[in-house]
Image (cartoon, rainbow, N blue to C red):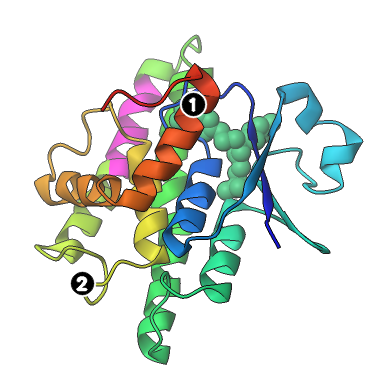
């Protein structure tokens, strides 16, 4: 059965692959699962028809027969469990890859989202200039710790790409253009390795085409 996911018909990132449908598209491409996309406006996301799928009125969602899921991490985990290629067979290696999925979403993503939120929604506040360096320091702490752990490895565990890397790369990409990642060349190279994967490129091209109506130029 071909699953259907939801995405924004006009994402604020203008097709840079930062909205959270990107990680679901990438996971589906990695495992070779075709999918359909239902595009939603911001107002449609808040209507009751969509809220039946997503209690918080957000994207992405995932529908497959009787199953409806929300939360990008849960959707990627579901895809990784149902298909080969995103989680190792060995039970301990699998548990470690799942640990990295949680680490990406619950330890690394929150300070990055806090910083983006401040940049987008709080620029006009009197305390913005004082708060931003604090938020950026929190991001730097996590980047430093992640960089130390990654070292010169290709991927986070056992040098085999997993759903943990997929989520971590999408989380780190949100810092594009911030100048924060460049201080850690191994993290920049790690992101570039993720972006070089053919499945990533297909997913990126598809979401880019939603915004621009054209394939990416590079
Ligand atoms: N925890 C949820 C998940 O991981 O699925 C979060 C989902 C979420 O925040 N979805 C956003 C949404 O629906 C779309 S990705 N927001 C509408 C709302 O909450 O009312 C949003 C997005 C767009 C652009 C960037 N960017 O440019 O960096 C990042 C994220």
Check the image and name the residue furthest to the right: 48
Residue under the point 87% across and 47% down: 52
Most frequent secondary structure within the magenta stretch:
helix
Tell me where the magenta segment starts and ends, as one range.
130-139
Question: Does residue 18 appear in the picture of this structure?
Answer: no
- Asked whether 131 falls inside the magenta stretch, the response is yes
Residue placed at 46% from the left, 38% from the top? 113
Q: Residue at x 42, y 75 (%)?
A: 87
Q: Does the magenta stretch include residue 82?
A: no
Q: Is residue 122 above or below residue 178?
A: above
Please state which of residues 197 and 136 is positioned toward the viewer in this rendering: 197
- Residue 177 vertical position relative to residue 102 in the rendered view, above or below: above
Q: Where is residue 75? Give x, y as percent.
A: 61, 59
Label 2: which residue? Answer: 159
Which one is nearer the viewer's eye here, 208 or 74? 208
Where is mark 1, residue-wise? Answer: 209
């Amino acid at each position: 059965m071909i699953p259907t996911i939801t995405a924004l018909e006009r994402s604020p990132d203008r097709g840079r692959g930062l909205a959270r449908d990107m990680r679901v598209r990438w996971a589906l491409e990695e495992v070779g699962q075709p999918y359909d996309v239902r595009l939603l406006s911001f107002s449609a996301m808040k209507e009751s028809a969509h809220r039946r799928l997503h209690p918080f009125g957000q994207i992405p969602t995932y529908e497959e027969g009787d199953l409806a899921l929300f939360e990008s991490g849960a959707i990627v985990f579901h895809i990784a469990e149902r298909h080969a290629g995103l989680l190792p067979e060995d039970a301990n290696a699998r548990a470690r890859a799942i640990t990295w999925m949680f680490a990406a979403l619950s330890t690394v993503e929150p300070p990055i989202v806090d910083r983006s939120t401040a940049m987008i929604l709080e620029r006009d506040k009197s305390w913005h200039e004082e708060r931003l360096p604090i938020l950026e320091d929190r991001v730097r702490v996590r980047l430093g710790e992640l960089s130390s752990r990654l070292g010169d490895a290709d991927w986070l565990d056992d040098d085999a790409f997993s759903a943990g890397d997929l989520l971590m790369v999408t989380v780190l990409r949100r810092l594009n253009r911030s100048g924060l990642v460049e201080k850690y060349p191994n993290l920049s190279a790690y992101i570039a390795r993720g972006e070089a994967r053919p499945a990533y490129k297909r997913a990126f091209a598809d979401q880019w085409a939603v915004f621009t109506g054209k394939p990416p130029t590079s």
